[in-house]
Amino acid sequence: MPLSRFKSMYKTIIFDWDGTLHNTKKLYGKAFRVAYDYLVKEGYAPERYYSDEETSVYLGMTPPDMWQTFMPDLPEDVKKTAAAMIGQNMDKIVADGGAILFPGAIETLEYLKDKGYTLIILSNCRNAYMDNHRAYFKLDRFFSDYYTAEAYNYIPKEEIVVSIMNKYSGEYMIVGDRSKDINAGLVHNIYTVACDFGFGSKEELSGASTHIKELLELKNIL
C-alpha cells in the first residue's frame, strides 16, 4: 500500500542537517581548503587544490571519522587543530551570511509543522555549529529538539536515535542523505527517506525505504 495511506501513523520526523536541509558544499569546501593550506604550510600534506565536489564526500561524517578517512596517519594533535580550523571557518561563513538551505526547505518545514508533526534534527556535527545554524535560520519555529554527535561523544546515529525514541512518540521517520541516516533507520525498523540531492552515493542510499529528488516531495509522503 502507498505510504500516503498511513500519514496519520507518523508523529516524529527526524531530519539530518547537512546535505538534507542545509546545502553545506560551498561552505565546507572553503573551510576545508583553509585547514588544508595550514597542513601544507606545516609540512604535513602536499600542495594541491580540493574542489567543493571532492570535499563533499566528508559531509555527514563526524570530525573524528572525517580525519580518520582523509589523513589517518596525521598526528592526533594536528588533526584536532585542523578540525578546529574547519569548524571556526564554517562558523564565520555562517555568521557572514554564507549558509544556504536547499530549495523548498522552508516551505516543506512549514507544511510539516502545520500538519502537527514533531520535527527533530539529528546531525553528526558540533554543538556550536548547530547552535549557529539554529539561530541564523530561526530553526526553533520548526524544530522541537536538536541532537548533535558532539553532545553524545560522537557515537553512531543509531545509538543516539534511542534517546529520541525514549523522549518522543512514534511512529518515526528518518530523512537523510548518507548511509549513517539510512542505517539508523534500518537498525530500529524506522521508515527512511533518502535525499538523492544530497552528498551520499547511490550505493550507500540503496537500503532506504524511499527516495526523493527534492524536499518538496515530502509533502506527497506526509
Image (cartoon, helix red, strand yellow):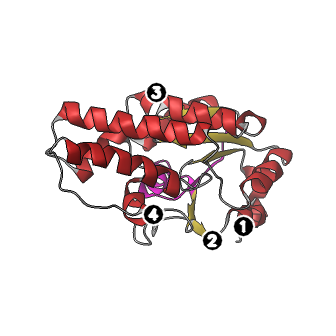
Disc 3 element: helix
Earlier along the polypeptide chain: callout 3 or callout 4? 3
Q: Which residues are magenta?
A: 169-191
Q: Which residue is mark 2?
A: 213
Q: Nearer the viewer, mark 4 or mark 1?
A: 4
Quote the CA–CA distance across marks 4 and 1. 18 Å
Q: Amino acid at mark 1?
A: Glu
Earlier along the polypeptide chain: callout 3 or callout 2? 3
Residue 140 in the image: above or below residue 7? above
185 or 147, nearer to the observer: 147
Q: Residue furthest front?
A: 41
Q: Position of residue 160 (x, y in %)?
A: 47, 36
Quote the CA–CA distance across marks 1 and 2. 7 Å
Q: Residues within 10 Å of mark 1 (few under 14, many from 20)?
A: some
Q: Amino acid at mark 4?
A: Gly
Q: Amino acid at mark 3?
A: Ala
Q: Amino acid at mark 2?
A: Lys
Q: Residues within 10 Å of mark 4 (few under 14, many from 20)?
A: many
Q: Quadrant of the N terminus?
A: bottom right
Q: Which mark is residue 217?
A: 1
Q: Are marks 3 and 1 in contact (CB under 8 Å)?
A: no
Q: Position of residue 67 (x, y in %)?
A: 27, 45
Quote the CA–CA distance across marks 3 and 4. 24 Å
Q: Which residue is mark 3?
A: 151
100 or 181, nearer to the observer: 100
Decide whether residue 174 is among the magenta residues: yes
Earlier along the polypeptide chain: callout 4 or callout 1? 4
Q: Residue at x 42, y 59 (%)?
A: 56
Q: Are marks 4 and 1 in contact (CB under 8 Å)?
A: no
Q: Residue at x 43, y 54 (%)?
A: 29
Q: Which residue is mark 4?
A: 200
